[in-house]
Image: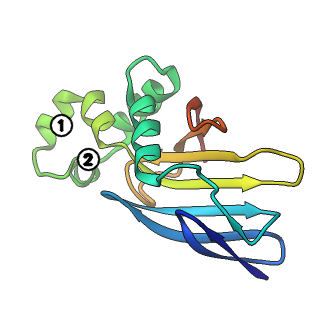
């Protein structure tokens, strides 16, 4: 068991297997960050500040045209009960939210978790989970991010 001190994320306790977890505040979001780390005790895992990275990933994922995202939103629009929709949309006007449909749910998406890893001989691996909030649904959108910090793919996963 050790500690990884990251330039931007702070101290993260790691188990003997190299895994660690921490909850962080980044702008208007609080997210769970999991780390799989093998290497030096200090690092800069992200290479940039967390909030701009999350803004870029979320902006890319919510742009219309990602078939996976569109299907995810359409599915959940039909699955949510009125009180769930009210909680997600942040108000009591679920009828108006339902009229706006997928667009209303698209606007409610937010980063909820991030997974960062670096194994010996490999580059950084980074994925951001996007959903409607912590523990709202079992399925989240997972956006893979390349080593330069650019979103490259999105999939729905449990």
Q: Residue at x 39, y 30 (%)?
A: 62
The residue under label 2 is: 85
Q: Residue at x 33, y 44 (%)?
A: 80
Q: Quadrant of residue 157?
A: top right
Q: What count of labels does the image hold?
A: 2
Q: Is residue 102 left or right of residue 120?
A: left
Q: Nearer the viewer, residue 143 or 82?
A: 143
Q: Nearer the viewer, residue 136 or 53?
A: 53
Query: Relative to residue 16, is residue 99 depicted above or below?
Result: above
Task: Give residue 68's position: percent from left, percent from top.
Answer: 52, 26
Mark positioned earlier in the residue sequence (1 or 2): 2
Q: Is residue 88 left or right of residue 119?
A: left
Task: Give residue 54's position: percent from left, percent from top.
Answer: 44, 46
Query: Relative to residue 138, is residue 148 depicted above or below?
Result: above
> How would you rate the neighbour count of disc 1 (Cα within 10 Å): few for under 14, some for 14-19, many for 20 or more?
many
The N terminus sits in image quarter:
bottom right
Q: Which mark is residue 97?
A: 1
Q: Quadrant of residue 150?
A: top right
Query: Relative to residue 31, is residue 3 depicted above or below?
Result: below
Q: Nearer the viewer, residue 109 or 127?
A: 127
Do the residues under discs 1 and 2 have CB atoms within 8 angstroms? Answer: yes
Secondary structure, mark 1, is helix
Q: Residue at x 43, y 60 (%)?
A: 134
Q: Quadrant of residue 133?
A: bottom left
Q: Identify the colour scheme used.
A: rainbow
Task: Give residue 34's position: percent from left, percent from top.
Answer: 63, 62
């Amino acid at each position: 068991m050790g500690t990884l001190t990251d330039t931007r994320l702070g101290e993260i306790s790691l188990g003997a297997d190299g895994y660690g977890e921490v909850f962080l505040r980044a702008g208007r979001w609080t997210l769970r960050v999991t780390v799989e780390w093998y290497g030096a005790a200090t690092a800069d895992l992200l290479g940039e500040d967390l909030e701009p990275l999350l803004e870029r990933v979320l902006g890319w994922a919510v742009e219309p045209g990602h078939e996976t995202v569109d299907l995810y939103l359409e599915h959940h629009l039909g699955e949510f009960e009125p009180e769930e929709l009210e909680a997600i949309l942040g108000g009591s006007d679920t009828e108006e939210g339902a009229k706006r449909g997928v667009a209303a749910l698209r606007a409610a998406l937010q980063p909820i978790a991030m997974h960062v890893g670096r194994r010996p001989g490999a580059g950084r691996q980074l994925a951001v989970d996007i959903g409607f909030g912590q523990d709202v649904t079992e399925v989240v959108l997972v956006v893979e991010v390349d080593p330069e910090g650019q979103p490259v793919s999105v999939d729905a996963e449990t």
